[in-house]
Image (spheres, grey):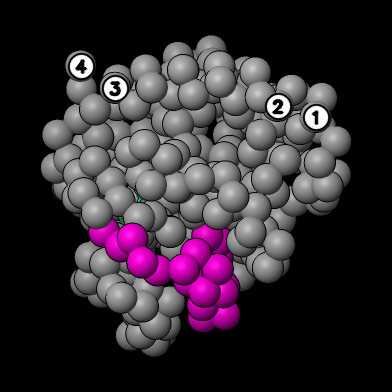
Amino acid sequence: MNILEQIVKRKKTEVLQAKNKVSVNELKNTESFARKTYSLKKSLKEKSGIIAEFKRKSPSKGIINDKADVLEVAEAYQKFGASGISILTDQDFFGGNLADFSKVRKESSIPLLRKDFMIDEYQFYEAKSIGADVVLLIAASLSPAQVQEFTELSHELGLEVLLEIHTEEELQHFNKNIDLVGINNRNLKDFKVDLQHSVNLKNLLPKETLSIAESGIYNVEDFKFLKEKGFDGFLMGEYFMKNENPGKAFEEFTNTIL
Ligand SMILES: O=P(O)(O)OC[C@@H](O)[C@@H](O)c1c[nH]c2ccccc12
């Protein structure tokens, strides 16, 4: 089993447990469920284009930062011009949790991406209830029909959809209702990063599609290269999180790209 398959397997158990604890009706009664969401599509154009991520650990890197405070980091990301914040909610593999997300929601007024492995309708209601604006759909772990279904449900809930692809075959998961396409520079099966591969894949998308370069952006050159190639957004985590003060690292990075 590759890592993605292991994560999805574990996720199925987790979702079952969550359903037994909190019903969809209860999720619908939360305060955040009624809020009007922010648009990441809009915010990408108005700000730096960077979606800055909060991530404590990952299967490819192990522990990245287990000390940073999620609220402090999120505040700095917003203050210094992030278009959005991505917050991992997967616990076992990425060290995140739902409470992190809800806390940040209360203090932020920019789009928040719930970063998790979405495999069940329930998780979309959950995402709305913790205050998400955008959800991630990973093509490698879903069928095109599921992507379509989950996109419709997300839109009913007022959530935007970021579809993550990595291979040419996964373009089949794309449909015109999808809000944003993320191209993962990192292969989730062997963790290799290849920016040129992403550029090639991006060029196969319809021109008007908003595209986000994800992962492995480790310096200003990488960023500038991808921007020049026409990406509309840049999802960056480790580069900031590996510092003791990720918010400061973000501030410094934005100063160098302006
Ligand atoms: O930390 P990086 O290399 O900057 O990458 C951020 C983000 O793209 C990465 O965390 C990610 C991309 N796709 C995912 C899917 C699930 C979990 C995590 C991810």
SS category of the residue bearing label 2:
loop
Mark 1 or 4: in front is: 1
Q: Label 1: which residue?
A: 26
Q: Which mark is residue 1?
A: 4
In the displayed structure image, the side of residue 214 where residue 186 appears, left or right: left
Q: Do the CB atoms of the residues marked 4 and 3 lie less than 8 Å apart? A: yes
In the displayed structure image, the side of residue 59 where residue 16 appears, left or right: right
Q: Can you give x and y, in whole percent of width and height, for residue 198 in the image?
A: 27, 45
Mark 3 C-beta closer than 8 Å to ligand 1 = no
How far apart in space, not on screen, are marks 1 and 2 (Cα)?
Answer: 6 Å
Span of residues in magenta: 64-85
Q: For label 4, count other residues whose C-alpha is less than 10 Å away and answer few (under 14), some (14-19) or many (20+).
A: few
Q: Do the CB atoms of the residues marked 1 and 2 lie less than 8 Å apart? A: yes
Mark 2 or 3: in front is: 2
Residue at 68% across / 68% down in the picture?
Answer: 107
Answer with mark 4 or mark 3, whichever residue precedes in sequence.
4
Q: Can you give x and y, in whole percent of width and height, for residue 10 in the image?
A: 38, 22
